[in-house]
Image: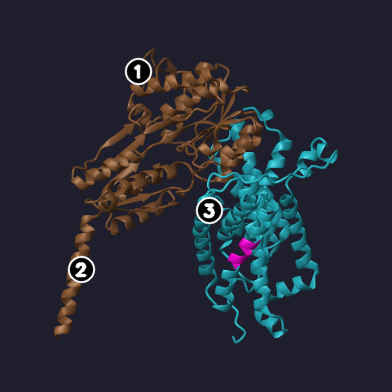
Amino acid sequence: MDLSAINPVLLIASLMVAATPLLLAAIGELVVEKAGVLNLGVEGMMIVGAISGFAISVETGSPFLGLIAAIIGGALLSLLFAFLTQFALANQVASGLALTLFGLGLSALMGQSYVGIKPPAMAKLDLPVISDIPVIGPILFSHDPVLYIGIALCAAVWAFLKFSRGGLVLRAVGESHDAAHALGYNVIRVRILAIMFGGACAGLGGAYISLIRVPQWTEGMTAGIGWIALALVVFASWKPWRVLLGAYLFGGINVLQLNLQAAGIAIPVEYLAMSPYLITILVLVIMSADKSRAPASLGRTFHASQ
Amino acid sequence: MKFTKLLTSAAVALGLATTAMAADKTKVGFVYVGPVGDGGWTYEHDQGRKAVVEAFGDAVETTYVENVPEGADAERVITQMALQGADLIFTTSFGYMDPTINVAKKFPKVKFEHATGYKTADNVSVYSARFYEGRAVQGHIAGKMTKSNVVGYIASFPIPEVIRGINSAYIHAKKVNPDVQFKIIWAYTWFDPAKEADAAKALIEQGADVILQHTDSTAPQAAAQAAGNVITFGQASDMGEYAPFPRVSSIIDNWAPYYVARTKAVMDGTWESVNTWDGIGAGMVGIGEISDAVPADVKAEALALKDALADGSYHAFTGPLNKQDGSAWLADGETADDGTLAGMNFYVEGIDAEIPN
């Protein structure tokens, strides 16, 4: 065992990268669920975002256009879900699962000619002097911009839900769509906007994997992160800062356990491999002892006539 | 009345015709653990499937299911294939072993071929490639090329096939570089690009300048490329898009000849349960082109090693070799028998790590 081989600064820097796709997808899904919609299609929207972003950035040579394409791609796919559940009044669970299956298939089709291609690199934040500060520089000031967007988004969602009128309406729709409707709010419109926001965030999260974290296109490359994001929202009791904490815990312990393995630590590998799941759930479950609960209308279909 | 009769006979004729057609065509099913576009393991199996289509044209009908999880789901998928009239089913991952055996019991007329396993039955063959021969060549190059003397190894699951690969690579790296050290990460997945990339990064951050992988995606190649001074090897497939650097060589699985031969055997009615384990010599394991990033003398040595493995004059596990705990395994000049290799569950002496149970 040689723990000195682990560089804590590099470790923290890479755990932030590992946590970002999860954070983006989960924060989007949090808003969707706060509006009372359960979208199980996160995985599908992520993978479509991953290939949309990848394809566009390869074609245009610009990673930023790629990210925008990923946002649009994810949002477009989520519109399909919005149509099915808000207008056709389809079951949300079934529609969400279908969206994931559809997204995985569609992305495989779209990505056929992009296997083995290298995307243009995303520039990292490089501030003179500040990025070179020992310890703090590599951890805080030398990442790609999307990582900061993830954290900013988390803060923005928190502030929006807590302080703004729009956030109050969104929460009202999620708690009791009948009451919100009676007050004259357009439940369907609020929900569609929330679903699109969720799709956009998932798409961005997917593109983060294909453009920055891995970076390459491989079929099925999100490999279940969308599902972990869904679980994370529940265990974080629908609270943005807990989503951030959970994502960093999960990403962090995942990276840490790989590092510990490489350093040859004497803990059996099986325990290390399951530790990210165990510890994240444990911490968040303990924190959720404050009786927070799901939005009351979560997963229920709304129609103005009912 | 007449009209009804006509319809009925037409229907019967149609039915007969379809049955006749179905009987003509040999149906071959493939169960894949990853997507066909993984650029590695599953990609090569699918190349094998395409070779079958090319060889027999309209006489065969192939189907495949991708991303089938190992375990209970696999049993459902294999059963479904058998129910749909498959004559021959290839199950292409170690974890499909028990599901394959279970389904085979229910469908005695269907022939099954399970890759990399060890359980056979009257209608179940097993086949695998001696990847460890390729690992020997990799280990040689890795030992010669590493400057930090740290070789990172991304392992998947602690099964004999993976352990054999680690041992073979280590033995041959150690032979040319006594100071070499292996750092091993168990990813517990065959395919998860993000995790594989994270594992590669962790190894690189801890000083590895050679990354060997036993997972299926090209993500570690991309991570090595980003690091800049790290070399890698293609796994299962050539991964040539990362050549000449970081990918300096590769192990290529060539399943096509085997798949064609086995399909032919089913067509001719000569199929019987066999246990195939072929290596470089038989062409089932290929060594991808060694790129110019490798010095000419190292390349020549690696190719000589490859030839010796191919013609059988050298065995990748030749004594004197001790087990990790220091106990004697192979005496000087003795070579490992297939039984020990097939069930290998120990590291050789010198590897500083433990195998998960």
**Name of the residue lying farthest toward the front:** A60
Q: Nearer the viewer, residue A256 or B34?
A: B34
Percent x, y for residue B350?
52, 20
Percent x, y for residue A113?
52, 51
Residue at 60% in and 22% down: B149
Q: Nearer the viewer, mark 1 or mark 3?
A: 3
Q: Is residue A259 visible?
A: no
Kind of residue sitting beneath label 1:
Ser
Q: Quadrant of residue A188?
A: bottom right
Q: Are marks 1 and 2 in contact (CB under 8 Å)?
A: no
Q: Quadrant of the N terminus of chain A?
A: top right
Residue at 18% in and 46% down: B269
Percent x, y for residue A153?
74, 58
Q: CA distance from mark 1 to mark 3?
A: 45 Å
The majority secondary structure of the magenta stretch comes to helix
Please say if A230 is above or below A250.
Answer: below
Q: CA distance from mark 3 to mark 2?
A: 40 Å
Chain B shade = brown
Residue at 70% in and 53% down: A64
Tell me the tag on residue B15: 2
Asked if both marks, 1 and 2, belong to the same chain, the answer given is yes
Disc 1, SS:
loop
Q: Is residue A13 visible?
A: yes
**In the picture provided, is A72 more to the left or to the right than A269?**
right
Percent x, y for residue B23?
20, 57
Q: Which residue is mark 1?
A: B313
Kind of residue sitting beneath label 2:
Gly
Q: Which residues are magenta?
A: A72-78
For the colour cyan, the matching chain is A
